[in-house]
Amino acid sequence: MNRPAYHRDPCLTELDTEVVEVGHDGERPFAVTADTLFYPEGGGQPADRGSMGGVGVIDVRKVEGVIRHVLAGELALGPVRQVLDWPRRLDHMQQHTGQHLLTVVALERFGWATTAFHLGAELSDIELDVPRLDDGALGRLEDAVAEEIRAARPVTVRYAGIDEMEELGVRSRLLPEGLSGEVRLVEIEGLDLNTCGGTHLASTAEIGALALVGTEPMRGGTRLFFVAGDRVRRRLAGHEARNRRLRTLLDGADADLPELVELRLAREKELARERRRLLAELAAATAERLAASPDPVIAAHWEDRDAGFLQEVGKTLVGLAPDRVALLTAGSGGDGAFVVVAPEASGLDLAIAGPEVCAVLEGRGGGRAPFFQGKASAVDRRDRAAATLRGSLGRDDGG
């Protein structure tokens, strides 16, 4: 049986082969080759990337048993050199082999069976049939996996008939219905034998390290997130870079950073409460000043306030000037806000006047009495909007 190059030698990075079929997969061209380095997506492992004849391979899929290389451009029939994105392949082998090891250790030492696996771009995860895992359980599992990594157990591939699965003690025998012929098995010597079509390392030692980084509930079980191989170093480097920034910003040691952040957050909440209190006082005082105006349409504008401030002023004006209308605006240029205040005693039909003001201010808004509010992209036309309201009052008075 002819096996693809990615199975014969998962560490092979270049291959001379031949394009035997071309076509289009949706809007993208694809090519089928006589042999291939590129693993197609499947079994929780993403597809490989790389190039063929200098054209980028952007996806690899198995369609009705045929491997299609989805390409960034067209290729012709004939000889072609495939070049694998090796760092991506190595990362996938580290994560996938790490998953096999994590899964069998979780099952054999703790009795937690894996029900699903996903290899992500940053984090990978397995789903375990256990309701929850506390920090102590995670620590024991991680330590047990580390032991097996240090044991440098060989990882090998073999093929066997379906009728041999039970006799061989294969861990997973969930095979497609109607499958015939040989089945590919991945073995971690002395520890695990499992059906799998993915690419793997030659030894558990090549995983380097595996770290468990969190859990979440999932369908009555637990989704367990992990990183393996070089991802552990990259993740640690990212944490160290963030810690350096935080040490500088908070002026503290690593061990003190959580407490310093909590203190800052508490202070921020306290300042936010104080700001809201002061703004409420300012809004009340502003409303009192505006209510002293004899104009039937009270108009006021603030460049450095927001819609929340306008609303606070408007609420107070309803009580202080229940028979008058107000147009309150804030902001500048194309980034403005407005509130039309029209208590029932003012006599203004807000359902008509509100959209008219909105149109003048080139904004959008809505609401219900006594407020019509929204955003305005022409807040500099507020004088015209106030004049529109005065005209509306005149119509309501029969003028």
Image (cartoon, rainbow, N blue to C red):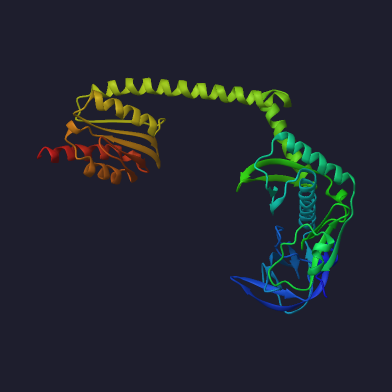
Q: Is residue 202 above or below residue 131?
A: below
Q: Nearer the viewer, residue 231 or 302?
A: 231
Position of 85 compared to 328: left or right? right
Q: Quadrant of residue 93?
A: bottom right
Where residue 85 sits: x, y (%)? 77, 60
Residue lying at 14% horizontally and 38% vertically, measured from the top left? 394
Q: How many marks on residues?
A: 0
Q: Nearer the viewer, residue 147 or 15?
A: 147
Residue lying at 35% horizontally and 42% vertically, measured from the top left? 378
Position of 189 compared to 78: left or right? right
Q: Quadrant of residue 265?
A: top right
**Quick one: quadrant of the C terminus?**
top left
- Taking the view exactly as shown, the residue that stands out farthest to the front is 167
Q: Nearer the viewer, residue 25 or 333?
A: 25
Position of 217 compared to 278: left or right? right
Q: Nearer the viewer, residue 283 or 139?
A: 139
Q: Is residue 328 above or below residue 27?
A: above
Where residue 149 sits: x, y (%)? 86, 46
Where residue 391 sits: x, y (%)? 18, 40
Residue 346 seen anywhere in this rendered image of the structure: yes
- Taking the view exactly as shown, the residue that stands out farthest to the left is 398
**Quick one: quadrant of the N terminus?**
bottom right
Residue 119 seen anywhere in this rendered image of the structure: no
Residue lying at 76% horizontally and 51% vertically, measured from the top left? 99
Where residue 122 sits: x, y (%)? 70, 48
Q: Quadrant of residue 88?
A: bottom right
Q: Is residue 263 above or below residue 138?
A: above
Position of 60 compared to 294: left or right? right
Residue lying at 69% horizontally and 31% vertically, measured from the top left? 245
